[in-house]
Amino acid sequence: MKGFLGVDVGSVSTNIVVVDADGKLLVDRYLRTSGRPIEVVQQGIYDIGKELAGDVEILAAGTTGSARFLTSMIVGADVVKNEITAHAVAASNIVPGVRTIIEIGGQDSKIIILRDGVVTDFAMNTVCAAGTGSFLDQQASRLLIPIEEFGNYALKAKNPVRIAGRCAVFAESDMVHKQQLGYNTEDIIAGLCEALVRNYMNNVGKGKEILDPIIFQGGVAANAGLVQAFNHYLNTEVTVPPYFGVMGAIGAALLAKDIYAKKGSTNFKGFNLRDIKYVTTSFECKGCSNACEVVQFYQNGELLARWGDRCGKWELQID
Amino acid sequence: MAKVGIPHALAYYLYYPFWKTFFEKLGHEVVVSTPTTRAILDRGVEETVNDACIPIKIYHGHVASLIDQVDYIFCPRLISVRRHGDFGTETFCPKFLGLPDLIRLTFTGAPPIIDTPIDINQLESKPKSKKDKKRKPAEIMEAACVETGDRLGNSITQSRAAYQKAAQVHQRFLTLLEQGKLPPEAIDILFPPENPISYELENPEFNLAVVGYPYAIYDHYINVGLLNILHKENIKVYTQDTLSDKILNQEASELPKSMFWYFSNRAVYGALYYMKKGYIDGIVHITAFACGPDSMVDRLLEIEARRRGKPYLPISIDEHTGESGVRTRVEAFVDMLRYRRDKK
Ligand code: SF4
Ligand code: SF4
């Protein structure tokens, strides 16, 4: 069988998928990046290779996510794409005609507006925790309730509590206050879900024309309480796609498929990446007071690329 | 002869050729700080009152880097350069108005600060005639030059002659801008360095209008090299500064009301002008985090861009702006333009 590999490496999670020639998902992996993107990608791809047990030949590979350049050098990618485009491609493939994509991950969130299959507007939040999954994570640990249970609690709520949630710090103190006033946990959790949705809408969703069909994706879409809160806020039904957590990687794989159709060959280095020795070193440039941290990337002792300089003095990429 | 320090920030990008020429003509030496670096930004963040916007913090960093090298710091009090807007009350943003005071109070051991006010509505202490009440911008600039020269021990005659020369160079600068050069390019043409900046492109794939404050657009450090990223993507950049005042001001009639602030009006008018142009594929607005005026400017431009169907990308800059964030947004925006074009 023929397949296409997609890898999405962000600061929190690393997702790896293989799709077949029809774009159907064959395998997926959701891993923690844990600050070691190189090893995680090497091991993850090795494991996927084992799982596929020689049944699938990879025709092309694509990477996305904030570590997309680094990752492309590790795996030998044929296409390197930003997260917005990758998510849009994946969502359009699963729900043709989608007009709004809500994407909330652990550390960031996005909104993508499409019309007639083309992205017309987007926004990203990478600074404010109040509109991302980490907001819920923090509150879950405060309430001593596993985040996986959050959805169930929220669905049981009768009167969600209004939590002032413009900022994660205020939300926390307001939540503690509501606990002390004696509100029950279900209503508080449902209130937190609603607060996150409000934050998201006021932050990334601000001023955007949100039209059906709406896809809700990203790791946080696992939370039924949030799905309900979005439905309630938007007064419609959002669709959570089956592989909501790995949509970026699926997008990268689909883009690889497109490139392969044009190019007919691949740079993919194979599943046995684990045997290649990748090393990054860094040094502080003394060229000027920017003091850039320049990163050097080696494959089996050979310098492949350099980046991190502000002025282009060190920039290097050997194909 | 004195050494006069000009911080490479804020109004530098539009007025450097003028003041450099003026001081040099008077026989003084001009020391300009280097383009913003991490050290300058860090120093600025450390020194400045916390709630200041990032461009003001950067300005402080530049002043700090000049302190030990010069006899004077040139920090004019920019109040207003024209009578414009409703009731003719346009000024620079309030933070410009108080800038010399901020600098003086922050850097107590600094060399003297030349804080000549530039104010179109300024009256002489005893107006000699009615005419003084309605002075022209050029007269205001000349008077500011005389006052500045006086601080440095130059006579009125010397300052007036230097003003004439400076005004000529400024005119050459404006002409270069109208020919499509961006301020850093035009500055390098007027005063050629070893490696002049150039954004020439043979066959650009797209034309984008990048609007915002000059000190946000042309400061490569703070916007993490946006102009270079666009240049590498083969995109030609137009800004409000490549339009003449006349063209910009025509846009004022598009709005029921003007903003109060000079640089904000320029950004808005520039954006409105480009939104109407077929050759412009999209608008990028660089906004400064914690900027009061920008919270209005950005919303206004967003609404207008949507109304006119022009792709619009706001990029907010602050001291933590990462290169990857800007790059991701720009790449996604360019992808979006490509898909749009291919669909047609
Ligand atoms: S890499 Fe360039 S910008 Fe960075 S410190 Fe060295 S000389 Fe300066
Ligand atoms: S206009 Fe905004 S960015 Fe510029 S000085 Fe004023 S507050 Fe700062």
Image (tube, coloured by chain):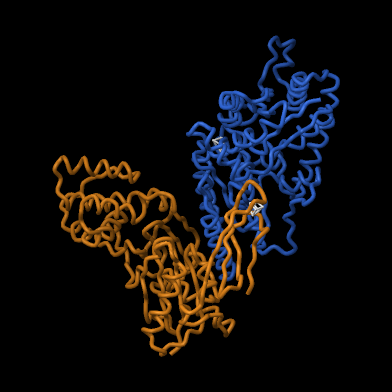
Q: If the image is split into quadrants, where does the N terminus of chain B sit?
A: top right
Question: Toward the viewer: B174 or A249?
Answer: A249
Question: Toward the viewer: A317 or A97?
Answer: A317
Image point 21% across, 46% down: which residue? Answer: A161
Looking at this rendering, what residue extends furthest in the front direction?
A301
Chain A painted colour: orange
Chain coloured blue = B
Q: Is residue B208 above or below residue A266?
A: above
Q: Quadrant of residue B129?
A: top right
Residue A32 % position (x, y)? 37, 66
Image point 47% across, 58% down: which residue? Answer: A122
Q: Quadrant of ligand 2?
A: top right
Left or right: B178, with A165 as reference point = right
Q: Is residue A122 above or below residue B153?
A: below
Image point 46% across, 87% down: which residue? Answer: A57
Image point 49% across, 71% down: which residue? Answer: A63
